[in-house]
Image: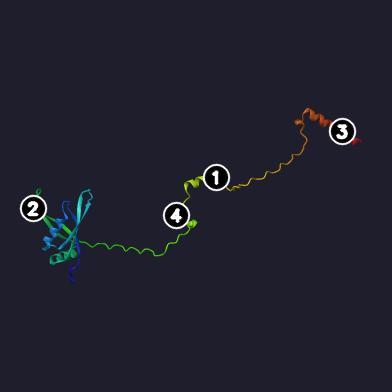
Amino acid sequence: MSSTNETTQIDSLFIGYAHSSCSPQQVKDAFENALNEEGIVKGVDELIKKNQYGQDFKVFFIHFNRSNRQLQHMVDEIARHDFHVITYARDWDRRNSRYVNRFWKVFAYKPKPKPQESAPSTAEFVPRMMTRDEIQTLGIIAPKSVRESQAAATPNLEEGEIRDERAAPERPKKAKPDWPKHPSQETPDDMANTFKRLRFEDNETKV
């Protein structure tokens, strides 16, 4: 579209709300009639949406091949007042018993710029072994079968114990001293032997 210092240049307009019965061809015809130039509309895109009550309505995006005086006037009005109005039909209103004009509110369409994708890294990938910190950070664990076999091979040790696979050497048993039995534990034979030993020791002392 051509523009001057006092005009606004725009490539597309859009209708923010239209009845679900409206069609892209109806929008194209209405704009070309209102702008008084056939073929000025390049194309119309349609988008179906739902309102807060779950009812369908349509949004239309109107693209133009060129501009003319009427279209530039519409664009300038939108720039000053944020929207403009175009009538597309005149219907009989049974409730009010009179004809009413059906209209659309038209707005300027400015597509959002697409975010620029960062260029992929050109650094060559070299296979390597992960560090243990990287493995733990990513939460990589051993397969279930390996964990089960390790758990079966490990005994239940108390805290602070260390498992030693080597067999501990047996400690030599200490010989118990031959302490004399308490009199309450002696049998009659033990008492006779003790009596004989004491008599022998007493005789040895006298000699």
Residue 176 place in picture, x, y as percent: 74, 39
Sooner in the amino-acid sequence: mark 3 or mark 4: 4
Residue 34 place in picture, x, y as percent: 11, 61
Residue that mark 2 sits on: 99
Residue found 8% across the figure and 53% down from its top: 99
Q: Amino acid at mark 3?
A: Phe
Q: Looking at the image, is 95 positioned above or below residue 206?
A: below
Q: Amino acid at mark 2?
A: Tyr
Residue that mark 3 sits on: 200
Foreground tag (2 vs 4): 4
Instruction: Tell me the element at label 1.
Output: helix
Q: Amino acid at mark 4?
A: Leu
Instruction: Tell me the element at label 4.
Output: helix
Count residues near mark 3 (Cα–Cα under 10 Å), then give few for <14, some for 14-19, many for 20+. Answer: few
Mark 3 vs mark 1, CA separation in Å: 66 Å
Mark 2 vs mark 3, CA separation in Å: 152 Å
Sooner in the amino-acid sequence: mark 3 or mark 1: 1
Residue found 19% across the figure and 55% down from its top: 17
Residue sticking out furthest to the bottom: 5
Quarter location, residue 187: top right
Mark 2 vs mark 1, CA separation in Å: 91 Å
Mark 3 vs mark 4, CA separation in Å: 89 Å
Residue that mark 1 sits on: 153
Foreground tag (3 vs 1): 1
Instruction: Tell me the element at label 2.
Output: strand
Sooner in the amino-acid sequence: mark 2 or mark 1: 2
Residue found 12% across the figure and 61% down from its top: 32
Count residues near mark 4 (Cα–Cα under 10 Å), then give few for <14, some for 14-19, many for 20+. Answer: few
